[in-house]
Image (tube, helix red, strand yellow):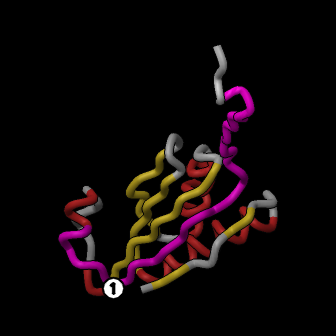
Amino acid sequence: MSDNHDEQIRIVQETVAGKEITFAHVMGGPAPIVYQKLGLNPQVDYSSSAIGIMNMTPPESAVIASDIAVKSGNIYLGFADRFTGTLIITGEISDVESALTEIVNFFRDEMGYVVCKITKR
């Protein structure tokens, strides 16, 4: 029985997460509905507030990032997930920007991570 598939090669590809921060963004003055839908702190002065969101691999890095964030200033830790590597923080715009900057700098300079640019809107 002749089979024309004898010459085919099957290739399986896997991705391995590196040490990297893949997303870092500051949302300045988001609408109150964004806070409500994310289940974030309702005791917020929305006029000067911001939400910072990050994603990193390995996902356990979010634990270290959350520690850096809360120690960097007056930050509210909204969400830190060691399974997905997602971190969400809130606070005054300057505090959120400062926290994300400290996280990115530490991971790049001390831990050898590849990091992305912090974006803002």
Q: Which residue is mark 1?
A: 48
* Residue closest to the eye, 10 or 50: 10
Looking at the figure, which quarter contains the N terminus? top right
Q: Residue shown at 52%/79% (left/top)?
A: 97
Q: Is residue 5 left or right of residue 88?
A: right
Magenta range is 5-34
* Residue closest to the eye, 33 or 21: 21
* Residue closest to the eye, 115 or 88: 115
Q: Is residue 5 left or right of residue 35?
A: right
Where is residue 41, by image quadrant?
bottom left
Q: Which residue in the rendered view is the most extreme toward the front?
A: 1
Q: Residue shown at 65%/29% (left/top)?
A: 4
Query: Where residue 91 sits in the image (x, y, percent)?
Result: 40, 73
Question: Is the residue marked by circle 1 packed among few (<14), some (14-19), or many (20+) residues within 10 Å?
Answer: few
* Residue closest to the eye, 4 or 25: 4
Query: Where residue 69 sits in the image (x, y, percent)?
Result: 55, 63
Tag 1: residue type?
Answer: Ser
The answer to whether residue 92 is magenta is no
Query: Where residue 63 sits in the image (x, y, percent)?
Result: 58, 48
The answer to whether residue 27 is magenta is yes
Where is residue 9, by image quadrant?
top right
Question: Is residue 4 depicted above or below 104 in this figure?
Answer: above
Q: Is residue 35 left or right of residue 1?
A: left
SS assignment for the magenta stretch, majority: loop
Query: Where residue 71 sits in the image (x, y, percent)?
Result: 58, 62
Q: Residue shown at 54%/70% (left/top)?
A: 24
Task: Name the secondary structure under disc 1.
Answer: helix
